[in-house]
Every structure is written in C-alpha cells, then in structure tokens.
Image (spheres, rainbow, N blue to C red):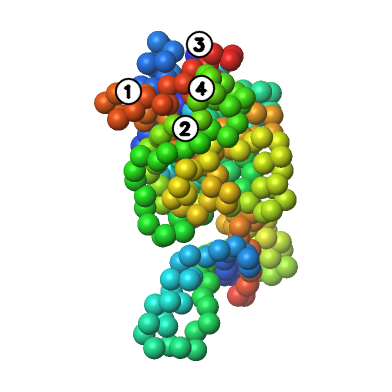
Amino acid sequence: MKAIVHVGLKPGVLDPQGRTIAGSLQNLGFDEVKGARQGKVIELDIKGDDVEAAKARVTEMCEKLLANTVIESYRIEIEA
Amino acid sequence: MRTAVIVFPASNCDRDAQSALAKITGRDPIMVWHRETELPDVDFVVIPGGFSYGDYLRSGAIAARSEIISDLKKKVEKGLPVAGFCNGFQVLTEAGILPGALMRNKSLKYICKPQPLTIVNSKSRFTTGYNGQKDVTFPIAHHDGNYYADKKTIDRLEKNGQVVFRYNGNPNGSINDIAGITNEAGNVLGMMPHPERAVDPLHGGTDGIELFKSVLGAL
C-alpha cells in the first residue's frame, strides 16, 4: 500500500515561500493567482492491506514526526 | 564544574561551544555523540548550532527524536540547566522542551551577521551576570530563525518573563522580535544568536561570556 502524506503550514501561519511563488506567477502574467501556499508530500510504502489500520498508524507518524503540529497541518491519502 | 555538548551529524558549532565552555570552566566539556543513550552526570548541557541531519524534514526535527534527547528531557524535568543555540534552539522546540517553532526567515534568505540584541529579562538564570547591561551583540547565522507560536503561548511567555532576548532590529520576522526564550521553570534557554561565538576578542566581541558565567555561576 502507499500512503501519501500532504504537510503544509496551517492557515494563518505566514508562508513567505508561498507568497514569493504567488508573486512570481503574477509577474509571469498569471493574474488569476490570488495566493499560494507551499507544502510537501511524503510518500510511504507500507506493509499490509488494512486501510483503516494504516490510516491510524500514519496519523501517529504525522503526530510524532512528519508534521510539526505547532505550525503545520497534514492530510493522509491511502492508495491500496 | 562539568559540562557536556551533544554532537549530532552535521552539528558545526559543537567545537565553538566546546572551546567556550573550556575557556569559562577551565575544563574540557564532555562531547556526547548522539548515539549515546544517556547523558553523563554534568551540571550544564549545550545543544550546539549547525545543520543536524542536513535539516532534512525540518530543522532539528530528526535530532529531536534521538534517544539522547529523550534522556535530556527527563533530566530537564529534574532541573538540569540546558542551552540550545541556533540549531540547538530548533531541536529544543521540535522536542517540545520549549514552546513554539522556528520557521523560514521572512526574507527567505540565510542571514549571517553580528546582531544587536536587548536583554529583556535580566533576572533569568542565563542573564544575571550582565548586571543590568541591556545591549549585547551576538552573531546570528541562520535560515530558519523566524520564531512563531500561537497568541496564547506568546502572551504566556511575555507574562512569565520567559522572553529573555529580543532582536534590536528584527532580522527574520520573529513574533515580538523574540530571539531567545526559556522554559517555564527557567532552566532551559533556546536562542537563535550564538553567544558561544562571542567569547574572545578575536570573535569580534566578548558579550557571550557573561551568559555562560551566569548559568555556571548560578549552579
């Protein structure tokens, strides 16, 4: 199974990299861009085939290491 | 007076901390490799600056999950004095020993320069030796020094006198110009500037000496 973890700064936390990306896109003429937030994606290869169990374990991984929940939030997708 | 410096892969201010502690205590600190599981019996521990684990995932994140830091946590609860400078501050926040987080500098640039600071709390365990002196200059050298915490935490830090150093001219976007904080008990200091690199006239300044004398003298 694959678990895909999206980690990004929480809403309200200033994201200077996202802001710079949005500015650069606007400079390139993409005027429709109102803002950008940058995050990261972590793909995990996971043993077993119990999706619910995997979700619970990956949540624990996010809380313990993958995200710093002081500033970041996360979202988990499991691909069977 | 026994001291220790924890060394992680890609720590790079461990030797600066070593020579600062040796100069001030007259005795070489114990250099503790991160694979050790228990700290030696010492009076003061420094977590040095650098780029532990190449700043992979987040600055300080991997180092904060090492066994030696679990042991440090237990000893901090018993009152062991600890200071983390630069990456050491990042490790302390990632480990949950100090509140908040250090984010990318607002300018997105790595900043390396002498930085004027104001001592906000001169009664902390790390600043009593300054005898009321308010202005000091320590070097800064960081990419992720932008201190962030939610409003409730910031209010609590300010109210308790846990904000010990503020930037005089905010270089990185830190909330309330915060450059260094202590835990609630006051035995742990985390700061982005480098007092260990301001202990010899050849460093360009010696403002860091009193910080070490304060914590070591207060033991």
Residue A68, position in %: x, y?
A: 60, 54
Q: Which residue is mark 4?
A: B130
The amino acid sitting under disc 4 is Tyr
Using the rendered view, name the quadrant where residue B163 is placed: top right
Which numbered tag is attached to residue B135? 2
Q: Residue at x 71, y 39 (%)?
A: B159
Point out the image quarter for the C terminus of chain A.
bottom right
Verify CB contact (< 8 Å) between mark 1 and mark 4: no
Chain that bears disc 1: B
Q: Is residue B218 above or below residue B109?
A: above
Verify CB contact (< 8 Å) between mark 2 and mark 4: no
Q: Residue at x 40, y 34 (%)?
A: B137
Crowding near the residue tagged with mark 1, few <14, some 14–19, many ≥20 C-alpha atoms within 10 Å: some
Query: Is residue B127 visible in the rendered structure shown here?
Result: yes
* Mark 3 or 2, closer to the camera: 2
Which numbered tag is attached to residue B200? 1
Query: Is residue B70 visible in the rendered structure shown here?
Result: no
The amino acid sitting under disc 3 is Met
Spatial CA span between label 1 and label 2: 18 Å
Q: Secondary structure at mark 2?
A: strand
Q: Residue at x 37, y 57 (%)?
A: B109
Crowding near the residue tagged with mark 3, few <14, some 14–19, many ≥20 C-alpha atoms within 10 Å: few
Spatial CA span between label 4 and label 3: 21 Å
Q: Is residue B58 above or below residue B126?
A: below
Whether labels 2 and 4 share one chain: yes
Which numbered tag is attached to residue B128? none
* Mark 3 or 1, closer to the camera: 1
Chain that bears disc 3: B
Whether labels 1 and 2 share one chain: yes
Residue B129, position in %: x, y?
A: 52, 19
Q: Which residue is mark 3?
A: B1
* Mark 4 or 3, closer to the camera: 4
